[in-house]
Image (spheres, helix red, strand yellow):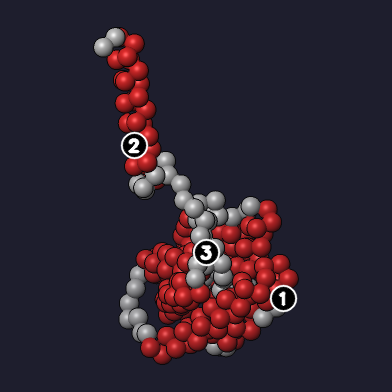
Amino acid sequence: MSEADQEQISDTQESEREASAQAARAHLPGWFGDWSSTATHHSPWEDAQGIAFSVLLISFGITLFQQLGLITSGIAGWSLVLHYAAGWPVGLNFFVLNLPFYALAIWRLGWGFTIKTILAVTLLSVLVEAESRWVSIASVEPAFGAVLGGVLVGFGLLGVLRHRSSVGGVTILAVWIEDMTGIRAGITLFVFDLSVFGTALFVAPLDLVGYSVLGAVVLNVFLAINHRRDRYIAR
């Protein structure tokens, strides 16, 4: 066999090895190499279970904040502020404060998004009220509770957003802004939270507001890093 033939065989084998390696990398997680995915659509059942379990996480995070006297992000934060200031039920506050945002959802994000959001908000309102009777937390260090609550609500919001829904309020606004401008939802939520915590200074002790800010930072940083429309492409 001539030297030219040997070189051609070697080049062919190298090309085959590279093609095989590329195919293998396509099935490995990102930290093992480059990979890509094909856009898919969630079925109604996948949306239902994803939203339900995500809302359950959010509701427990809010319950944890409430029992520690803390405040969380968004409309849920305003609901807690009203609860501390006037004694109104958190679940009812949350449901009523979300009503004006449904018009924006219908106008800009469509009926599918809006219907899923209304169902998620209703379920969350019911769960928060029910958990105030079902769950009693004897003792949790406020700083740890703030971090844990932020993670729970963050995971829940991430799941809801990935199923093209929201828990209403400023989340609807954040999703719309992200669709229009590319600004991540977590950044919009954090800016809105400044008004929540500014008001909270008048109804809650300074140290608890500080712990609440810690929880909000954890929540919104988690969302800003993990809620990436260019990475999670299922709809």
Judge left or right: residue 228 versus residue 12.
right
Judge left or right: residue 23 versus residue 103.
left
Residue positioned 51% across, 80% down in the render:
124
Residue positioned 61% across, 78% down in the render:
115
Image-quadrant location for residue 77: bottom right
Kind of residue at badge 1: Ala
Label 3: element kind: loop
Neighbours of disc 2 within 10 Å: few (<14), some (14-19), many (20+): few
Q: Residue furthest front?
A: 1
Mark closer to the chain start, 1 or 2? 2
Kind of residue at badge 3: His
Image x and y of residue 118, in percent: 60, 80
Mark closer to the chain start, 1 or 3? 3
Quote the CA–CA distance across marks 2 and 3.
29 Å
Q: Which disc, if any, is residue 103?
A: 1
Q: Residue furthest left?
A: 1
Mark closer to the chain start, 2 or 3? 2
The residue that disc 2 covers is: 20
Q: Is the C terminus in the top left, top right, bottom left or bottom right quadrant?
A: bottom right
Q: Is residue 138 visible?
A: yes
Q: Nearer the viewer, residue 134 or 55?
A: 55
